[in-house]
């Protein structure tokens, strides 16, 4: 059975006009496993609940002590050993707890590399501008439609610099590079911390002048997997840590409303283990992008439009790791799952592959839809670019620029997915840098179109109304010469007329979804909450299993916020679980 967005709304409609008027929020109780909603929403055979919603949860597996061949005992159990889980493992161990880590893959493997750190000694040493917590938290709240919890971000921004120092001290050879495009050997890369978009391409640029700022507070790990493995090794030095790879956590053990352990399946022989957790269990199992039922329930547009997803990690049985296991275990234990989830869909420009290097990034050059019409102030970060493209006919548009791009690119913001560095030679594959050869290669392999005339360029664009497009370009050139964008209000320093051949056009379509965000309702202590707003004792969440961090869309104004939050709240969850907070 397939459920489309339209089907989803239709299904919601059968509940009654009051619910329909209340929008999707009114549908949300049946997404949760609170006792009331579980009673109301009985399942049907087709995987759909009788209120029209997708049955993403189903019944918990019927595992009991009788099925278990072994019982293990710890103070804290960490489920999932990646960014969040490795941090939790070490944090709990260094607080003196006996810790067991469970991971369904063969080894620690992380996905992202960029990590937010606003302020602190490393940023100060680089001379980065001071950024207040208030300005970051306010921006994040705006981008989440004020449907996320400010306290989660507030604590993260304030305390991340010290947690980051603690994480990186696991690698005594770690070092900060001088610029964002260092030339490094493979060995050096393992220990490198690269300051993103540093030094800034235009000394006159300030994030404070942007309508949607990109805060200069991101480090890229040359090899985050290596750093997290070193954190596990550091945890093991305490002598109180055991790790079990190739083991699948399947169900939490609850006693009188408290989480007291977890049932785990050993993949090798299918045997079940009971693991008791005196202080609690930390769920750090990542997101649910590869769970179709959860995607249909929480992010139906992504499924309906068939947007591509990018996820590379597999478990020991060959399946993707991000299947929402922690979300389901928490929901079965009575946790509320937050409303208004967010797909992470940050456009990187047309022609981008898995390396994220679009031909001319998301630079705010003129962009026209297939009707030949301009439709936005193009000067937007990648998530907002994506949102605007999805509104256009056939979700297809074209970005236009000309041969002057090398001298123009530094005028665009030093932001995620923006081409803002240029050099003649192809010196670096840095994501925000392009050379002449990069653009030539894109023309040669068909990712960019090129012509010496506007007419010649438009002729090559399949499905575009060339006459309208020509008129739009003439109008745009006029606005550029007047220095005022009366139509869409783009700032004057980014109004570049198209009049210097050769001209280029790059196709924009919806980008890949890399992760999705939304999980068990949480707080700045990594606790988990019931539908009634009560903390579930002994149950903690971190990383992409943690709810209430973002909503509606993932903010891109602080790049690396996913990895940053995972490392930070993994650490907080580990410390709190060990201390019984
Ligand atoms: C290609 C790519 C690039 C990215 N780049 C960035 C970036 O630069 N910056 C950024 O901020 N974000 C980035 N992201 C997103 C970021 O990587 C993730 O949001 C982040 O890694 C989440 O970490 P996590 O620890 O919460 O989850 P995960 O890394 O998904 O780890 C969860 C772990 O739990 C294990 N697990 C799951 N279920 C069970 C179970 N039942 N039993 C036992 N173990 C289980 C999984 O095997 C996995 O190892 C990127 C994502 C992708 C795909």
Image (cartoon, grey):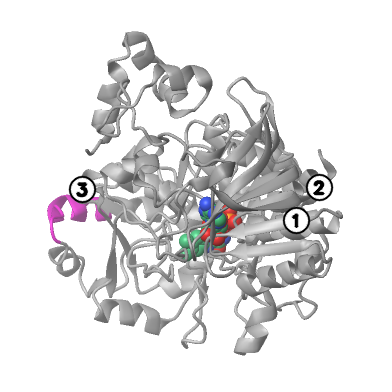
Residue hosting label 2: 578
| Disc nearest the viewer among 1 and 2 | 1
Residue hosting label 1: 99
Q: Height in image: 81 above or below 294?
A: below
| Disc on the earlier residue, 2 or 3 | 3
Tell me if I can see residue 418 in this picture: no
Residue hosting label 3: 394
> Which residues make up the magenta segment?
462-474
SS for dot 1: strand
Q: Nearer the viewer, residue 284 or 391?
A: 284
Q: Nearer the viewer, residue 439 or 282?
A: 282
How far is disc 2 from disc 3 in space, using C-alphas?
52 Å
Q: Height in image: 512 above or below 533?
A: below
| Label 1 with label 2: CB-CB less than 8 Å | yes
From the image, give the main secondary structure of the stretch colored magenta: helix
Image-based side of 273 in relation to 412, left or right: right
**Label number found at residue 161:** none
Report the residue that reaches farthest toward the right.
96
Q: Quadrant of residue 367?
A: bottom left
| Disc nearest the viewer among 2 and 3 | 2
Is residue 403 on the magenta stretch? no
Image-based side of 426 in relation to 280, left or right: left
**Percent of width and height locating residue 163:** 78, 57
| Disc on the earlier residue, 1 or 3 | 1
How far is disc 1 from disc 3 in space, using C-alphas?
52 Å
């Amino acid at each position: 059975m397939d459920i489309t967005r339209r089907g989803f709304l239709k299904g919601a409609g059968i509940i009654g006009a009051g619910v329909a008027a209340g929008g999707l929020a009114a549908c949300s109780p049946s997404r949760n496993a609170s006792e009331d909603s579980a009673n109301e929403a009985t399942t049907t055979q087709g995987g759909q609940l009788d209120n029209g919603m997708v049955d993403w949860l189903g019944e918990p597996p019927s595992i009991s002590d009788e099925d278990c061949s072994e019982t293990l005992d710890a103070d804290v159990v960490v489920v999932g050993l990646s960014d969040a889980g490795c941090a939790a493992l070490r944090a709990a161990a260094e607080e003196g707890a006996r810790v067991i880590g469970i991971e369904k893959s063969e080894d620690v493997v992380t996905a992202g590399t960029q990590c937010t750190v606003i302020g602190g000694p490393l940023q100060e040493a680089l001379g980065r501008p001071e950024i207040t917590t208030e300005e970051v938290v306010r921006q994040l709240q705006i981008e989440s439609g004020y449907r996320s919890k400010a306290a989660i971000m507030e604590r993260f921004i304030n305390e991340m610099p010290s947690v980051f120092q603690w994480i990186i001290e696991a690698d005594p050879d770690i070092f900060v590079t001088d610029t964002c495009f260092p030339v490094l050997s493979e060995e050096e890369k393992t220990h490198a911390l690269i300051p993103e978009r540093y030094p800034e391409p235009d000394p006159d640029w300030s994030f404070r002048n942007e309508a949607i700022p990109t805060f200069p507070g991101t480090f890229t790990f040359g090899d985050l997997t290596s750093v997290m493995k070193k954190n596990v090794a550091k945890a093991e030095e305490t002598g109180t840590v055991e790790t079990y790879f190739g083991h699948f956590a399947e169900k939490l053990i609850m006693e009188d409303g408290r989480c007291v352990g977890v049932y785990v399946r050993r993949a090798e022989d299918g045997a079940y283990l009971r693991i008791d957790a005196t202080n609690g269990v930390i769920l750090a199992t990542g997101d649910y992008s590869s769970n179709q039922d959860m995607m249909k329930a929480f992010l139906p547009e992504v499924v309906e439009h068939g947007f591509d997803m990018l996820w590379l990690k597999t478990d020991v049985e060959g399946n993707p790791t991000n299947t929402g296991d922690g979300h389901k275990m928490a929901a079965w234990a009575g946790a509320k799952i937050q409303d208004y989830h967010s797909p992470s869909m940050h456009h990187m420009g047309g022609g981008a592959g898995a390396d994220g290097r679009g031909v001319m990034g998301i630079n705010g050059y003129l962009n026209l839809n297939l009707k030949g019409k301009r439709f936005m102030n193009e000067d937007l970060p990648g998530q907002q670019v994506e949102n605007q493209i999805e509104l256009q006919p056939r979700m297809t548009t074209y970005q236009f620029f000309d041969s002057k791009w090398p001298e123009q690119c530094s005028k665009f913001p030093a932001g995620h997915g923006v081409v803002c560095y240029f050099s003649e030679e192809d010196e670096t594959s840095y994501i925000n840098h392009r050379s002449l050869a990069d653009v030539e290669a894109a023309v040669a392999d068909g990712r960019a179109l090129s012509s010496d005339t506007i007419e010649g360029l438009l002729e090559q664009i399949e499905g575009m109304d060339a006459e309208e497009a020509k008129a739009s370009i003439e109008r745009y050139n006029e606005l550029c010469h007047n220095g005022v964008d009366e139509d869409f209000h783009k700032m004057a320093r980014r109004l570049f007329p198209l009049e210097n051949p050769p001209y280029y056009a790059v196709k924009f379509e919806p980008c890949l979804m890399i992760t999705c965000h939304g999980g068990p309702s949480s707080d700045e202590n990594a606790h988990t909450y019931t539908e009634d707003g009560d903390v579930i004792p002994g149950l903690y969440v971190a990383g992409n299993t943690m709810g209430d961090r973002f909503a509606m869309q993932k903010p891109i104004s602080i790049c690396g916020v996913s990895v940053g939050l995972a490392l930070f709240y993994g650490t907080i969850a580990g410390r709190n679980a060990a201390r019984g907070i």
